[in-house]
Image: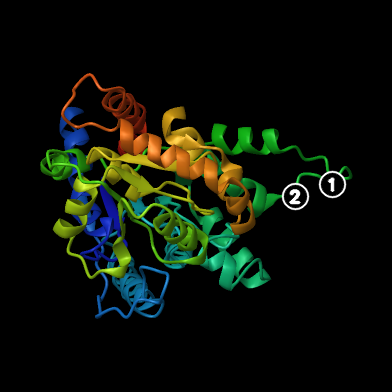
Amino acid sequence: MTIWIVPTEPVTTRYTREWYYHIPKMIEGMANDRKMEVNIIIVDGEQVPPVPTPGAFLDFSATNIWKSSQLATIAEEFQYSRVKAGDKFLFTDAWNPTVISVKYMSELLNIPVEIHGMWHAGSYDPQDFLGRLIGNKPWVRHAEKSMFNCYDTSWFATDFHIDMFINNMFGPFTNEEWDVDFDDVKSKLVTSRKIGLTGWPMDYLFDVLSPYKKLDKKQQICFPHRIAPEKQLAIFNDLAAEMPEFEWIVCQERELTKHEYHTILGESKIVFSANLQETYGISCIEGLICGAIPLVPDRLSYSEMYNVPFKYPSEWTESWESYQCNKSNLVACIRDLMRAYSTGDANNSTATDIANQTLLLNKYVKADPLIAALLS
């Protein structure tokens, strides 16, 4: 069996570069444990120098150059019969129109393959840049439905993301004239393996970030997110003005290497979020592994991923107006956490809370369900 990995561009400053090397190793490792022989082929694209759009990690043109050249490569592999019946494809970002052409060639050439995709975001999320800039225009919503229907299994990292995807892609479920119920739809999609829940392949972070966890903590709070409307940087900046006794760092305002970025996380006591959009939250995971407190609102993917000590009430930052009404509560919360944090005391309650949170995080940073499905 051959597994064809169709990766996202391996950008140096993003997790996609680590995934480019780590996912094949995970597949090989589980295959060896099962005494299986598997051939892994990575489908590269043409990677041109990016010019990222403000508020996004990607250059919207360069990513299409990458995907289009991936498609040309895959088409040639089909043309010369190097793709065989029973092969499997893994798209590490399911939002890739190339999958439609893979399905097209598979069916017309009578070469049945199994296709898996990992969903990160899309126009179905009104707070994502696709949702904000394009919305639910028919062309994008139907394109996403088409891509979804091309995948044998669509994979998501959190239940929150699954629920939002189903509600916004196939809903609304409030029309009494429809004989449709959300729970029934979700149950059918999950039971049929059309939708799957898996951790993302982030377990390598424990080794990568181990040295940074040992750094001395400073009176420092960082904002590790993109500078985009849904991240609500204005709230972070307002808190900084309110509490000048701490150092407040907006990471994306600096041109940081990965080492410099991880150093900031390792020296910070808190990584802060007021996000209105989050289906996973890699930066908060990185902060936690570096020994920082992920201070997050009790909404989005955060609700299921984080324990009570690190979640503040959602209404505190649901909007700028809501924040103003609850600002004093958030200020008090941050000051309490900064005061309580002590890296020198192993019995400190904060250290215990971080350890317990790391245990909860384990299922979100291991992609065993996905890898097992690829090898089944």
Which residue, given by chain and number where applicable, does mark 2 sit on?
A: 172
349 or 151: which is nearer to us?
A: 349
For the C terminus, the image quarter is top left
Residue 315 point in image, percent of width and height: 61, 44
Q: How many marks?
A: 2
Left or right of 239 in this view: 172: right
Q: Quadrant of residue 84?
A: bottom left
Identify whether 346 is placed above or below 254. Answer: above
In this view, which residue lies farthest toward the top? 347
Q: Quadrant of residue 293?
A: top left
Badge 2 amino acid: Pro
Q: What is the distance, in whole Å, between disc 2 and disc 1 at their CAs?
A: 7 Å
- Residue that appears at 12% across and 38% down: 214
Which scheme is used to colour this image of the protein? rainbow
- Residue that appears at 89% across and 45% down: 177
Which residue, given by chain and number where applicable, does mark 1 sit on?
A: 175
For the N terminus, the image quarter is top left
**Residue 73 showing in the rendered view:** yes
